[in-house]
Amino acid sequence: MDLEKQRGRNAALAIAAVVVIVGIPLWWRTTETYRAWLPMTQIRELDSLHLCLTVEVEVVFAQGTLAPDHQKKLPLSQVREQDHHVDTETNLKYRYETKYRTATIMEEDALNQPTPAEADTALHILSESACGSVVVYVLPASSNLLAEGVNVFVGLKRTALVTFEQRTGPLQAVLSAIDAEVEPVLQTMSFGHRDIIAALSNRIRLAKLSKESLVDSMRAFKSSPGYEITFSLLNPSPQYHKVQWDIEGAVQQYIQPLLDKMAPVSNFSVDSQILYYAVLGVNPRFDKTASAFTLSADSLAHVINPVEARLGSNAASSNPVLNFLLYVPDPQHSPLIIRDHRGQGVSTNAFHSPRWGGIMVYNVNDMYDKDTASLPVNLNIDMSKVMGVFLAQLRLLLGVHQVRPPKGFEVQGPGNAGVADWELDRLLWSRSVENVATASATITSLSQLLDEIGNIVINDNIAQQVLNAVTAIQAAIAELEAGNLAFALQYSREAILASECAFFDPSLLHLLYFPDDQKFAIYIPLFLPMCVPILLSLLKIVSEVRQKRAEKNAKKD
């Protein structure tokens, strides 16, 4: 009998040992959530964003702007820094590395061109400035190159012409005086503090943004790897109007040069369509004084929704869509005039909607005689008039803001290029900072989510994307500090792509909604029938051991 009891005890202990030593670790190992390693220390460092933006500035003195003894002391270099404390987690430093030198003989010849625009082109041919840099040529006050009343000329490249009256005194005092003239040039041609603050809108409170910064940031599309641009011709009455438009040729002539220069920022695709019987969602009112139908500024917001339902969407792409609509009113509502908030007619007869696109009303009532024309009337759209409006709207929606230069400045228009080199640089600075801020916020949010919810699977692909994002963010910050704007933009684009791929990975949601009560409902029917006999056997063994110890103690006594 004692032998049977001993065998029972040994069997119970063996089973318990197998369960504890083998079963529980095996179950724990096979049911644990796989979480790959993440660089959490580096991610936490991204909570505090410290950016240093370095701009290379070259000040070139033409003949007659410096005294001979000052010219002998050139070239010189100096560094000027500006610190801006945005909030407890965001700090900015602007670093201007300025080099002073005298103009070469070839540059002097280029400055003798009859117009400042020709001088700007000639200087660009001699040497092309690096992306993000600014070159300021200082001309004597007696120079006739600039028009009367113009002290600064800003061309299409990264070059500015500034008039300066020769001064005597220490060289440092002269350089300080020219720096005061160069400062507004840098604020115009390079980034401004307002633009950088607007680019950080994902990290800072809206109260930190000025009214103009908030308007600009809300108007332009957020940074994206690609954009879809759609041009639509809306013809509500094809029975009256047979409208022809050379959209392909117009895009090649007016839009494509801008998109080619914007290629470092994003990828673009362009398509077009014609929509028949597409009407506006608002009935225009007839104004007897103007003998025309009018759309007030308050009613423009109601125009977009009904039309948008007809536009369609590209389901194969997740890129933002920029819509540009050309609306030809039907004869019953022609001419149609758009009025602003003051009740005045808009000169372009067009308006744009932030982060959506633009609409232009093209009246054709004066292009034919209603009484004698045979229907439908063949009408050709003046694409130069239309694309000029759409190009201006496209610049605003892509973030190329209109610069308000100080008094005495002459800024050359971008012309056929669509955007000047220095305008593109301003956009690249903003986009680089915006991408870094957005990517760092995305990665830190992801790490907080993974810390709070421990049963989310972190596979190797997500870990690699997070590591790539962190590495690209660090590289972009380093390139911004080094003044390499082109490389900074490239790394920032890689960072935002990798961070969004990691954050929106579908595998992160597999175990996100798997509560603990469901775990108990699954495991209790499996483990309870097995564990109860083992626990009862162990309790019985413990009880017998205690009983034997008590009997031994009683015998000793």
Image (tube, helix red, strand yellow):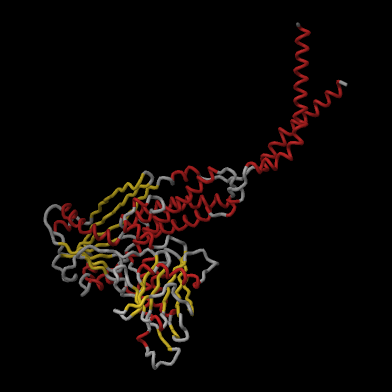
- Residue 163: x percent and y percent? 18, 64
Q: Please say if 175 is above or below 247.
A: above
Q: Please say if 527 is above or below 438.
A: above
Q: Please say if 461 is above or below 317.
A: above
Q: How many marks?
A: 0
**Residue most extreme to the top:** 557
- Residue 461: x percent and y percent? 57, 52
In the image shown, does 164 or 195 lie closer to the viewer? 195
Which quadrant would the C terminus be assigned to in this image?
top right
* Left or right position of 51 against 168: right
* Left or right position of 95 against 267: left
* Left or right position of 391 against 12: left
In the image shown, does 166 or 433 lie closer to the viewer? 433
**Residue most extreme to the left:** 168
Q: Residue at x 68, y 37 (%)?
A: 25
Q: Residue at x 88, y 21 (%)?
A: 1
**Quadrant of residue 165 in the image?**
bottom left
- Residue 151: x percent and y percent? 19, 65
In the image shown, does 187 or 346 lie closer to the viewer? 346
- Residue 116: x percent and y percent? 23, 71
**Quadrant of residue 483 in the image?**
bottom left
Q: Residue at x 43, y 88 (%)?
A: 378
**Quadrant of residue 368 in the image?**
bottom left
